[in-house]
């Protein structure tokens, strides 16, 4: 049986699970809390508790049956918790033929708005992104040491149903922050699932893929477009200096880059359903009204 085990069966991993479950794949994964574990179990998944502080009970046996593993749990200050506690289980897994690791385009750092692709050298500008590069390198080393296929997916800003500009507008947290020349890359969660499914099915000859819609754009424009679709007034524009951003928010606005996605199209053969936020937002709104 084809079996997917997800370290961190959250928003993006669940999109892949929904894609492959109708094909007869068995789905298992981890949550960080007992409440999260119960939620996954209620959806019919084999659910395990793994908080990154100790090996997860039952995970070793589950990995012995896994054919595919997706890792979306991020690194901590001590490295990648999945490898720290379950490297041996993964190395011994007799049926395992694919490991996907979800990373971030943040590893490229700032390019002052210039276009880059997967051939660009990582240049992380934050501790968070530096940890991601460390985790990417650790997974590459694991694959080489144990003869396992590992592919790394550097994601743009993730959005989709329940996690979009519409939700921010409705709950009053949307802000139109303006920094001249600033753009961000995004990716719809269902397009992430398409990319991962193609790779898990054996497509692609590369180790690293940028998973973005290829249409970087200013954040304030997306918020204004979402407001227009809802028929509401957008929040007023404010400068990045006026926004009083958190340290994480400031780090996002300190980096400006345009990330290309040709490799996922040319090598994985994926045609994105949502080539920009405009198609993505339109679909989210249409489905919410059906």
Image (tube, rainbow, N blue to C red):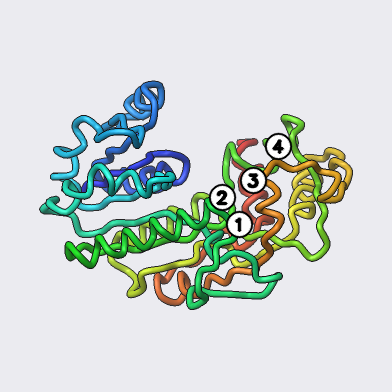
Left or right of residue 68: residue 51: right
**Of helix, strand and loop, which one carries label 3?**
helix
Q: Residue at x 84, y 38 (%)?
A: 232
**Residue sitting nearer the eye, 288 or 11:** 11
- The answer to which image quadrant residue 65 occupies is top left
**Of helix, strand and loop, which one carries label 1?**
strand
Left or right of residue 22: residue 185: right
Left or right of residue 102: residue 23: left
Residue pointed to by mark 3: 248
- Report, in whole angstroms, how far the alpha carbon at label 1 lies from the one at label 4: 16 Å
Residue 20 is situated, as x and y percent measured from the top left of the image, at: 33, 48
Q: Earlier in the sequence, mark 3 or mark 4?
A: 4
Residue 261 is situated, as x and y percent measured from the top left of the image, at: 53, 70
Q: Earlier in the sequence, mark 1 or mark 4?
A: 4
Residue pointed to by mark 1: 186
* 251 is higher (above) or lower (below) than 63: below
Query: Mark 3 against mark 4, which lies toward the viewer?
Result: 3
Residue pointed to by mark 4: 168
**Residue sitting nearer the eye, 235 or 135:** 135
Q: Badge 3 local density, few (<14 within 10 Å), some, or many (20+)?
A: few
Whether pointer 1 and pointer 2 mark residues with C-beta atoms closer than 8 Å, the reply is yes
**Residue sitting nearer the eye, 193 or 84:** 84
- Report, in whole angstroms, how far the alpha carbon at label 3 lies from the one at label 4: 18 Å
- Report, in whole angstroms, how far the alpha carbon at label 1 lies from the one at label 2: 6 Å
Q: For residue 158, which numbered disc appears in the image?
A: 2
Q: Badge 1 local density, few (<14 within 10 Å), some, or many (20+)?
A: many
Q: Earlier in the sequence, mark 3 or mark 1?
A: 1
- Report, in whole angstroms, how far the alpha carbon at label 2 lies from the one at label 3: 16 Å
- Report, in whole angstroms, how far the alpha carbon at label 2 lies from the one at label 4: 14 Å
């Amino acid at each position: 049986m084809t079996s997917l085990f997800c370290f961190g069966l959250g928003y993006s991993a669940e999109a892949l699970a929904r894609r492959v479950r109708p094909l007869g794949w068995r789905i298992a994964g981890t949550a960080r809390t007992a409440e999260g574990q119960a939620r996954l179990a209620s959806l019919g998944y084999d659910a395990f508790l793994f908080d990154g502080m100790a090996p997860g009970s039952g995970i070793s046996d589950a990995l012995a049956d896994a054919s595919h593993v997706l890792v979306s749990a991020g690194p901590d200050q001590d490295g990648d918790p999945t490898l720290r506690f379950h490297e041996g289980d993964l190395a011994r897994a007799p049926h395992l033929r694919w490991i996907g690791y979800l990373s971030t385009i943040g590893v490229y750092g700032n390019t002052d708005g210039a276009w880059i692709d997967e051939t660009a050298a990582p240049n992380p500008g934050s501790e968070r992104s530096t940890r991601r590069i460390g985790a990417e390198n650790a997974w590459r080393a694991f694959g080489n040491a144990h003869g396992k296929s590992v592919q790394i997916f550097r994601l743009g800003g993730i959005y989709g149903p329940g996690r979009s500009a519409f939700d921010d507008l409705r709950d009053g947290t949307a802000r139109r922050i303006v920094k001249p020349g600033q753009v961000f890359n995004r990716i719809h969660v269902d397009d992430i699932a398409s990319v991962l499914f193609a790779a898990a099915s054996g497509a692609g000859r590369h180790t690293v893929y940028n998973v973005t819609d290829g249409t970087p754009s200013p954040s304030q424009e997306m918020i204004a477009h979402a407001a227009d679709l809802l028929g509401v007034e957008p929040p007023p524009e404010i400068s990045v200096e006026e926004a009083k951003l958190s340290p994480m928010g400031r780090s996002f606005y300190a980096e400006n880059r345009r990330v290309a996605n040709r490799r996922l199209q040319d090598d994985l053969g994926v045609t994105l359903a949502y080539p920009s936020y405009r198609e993505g937002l339109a679909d989210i709104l249409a489905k919410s009204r059906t």
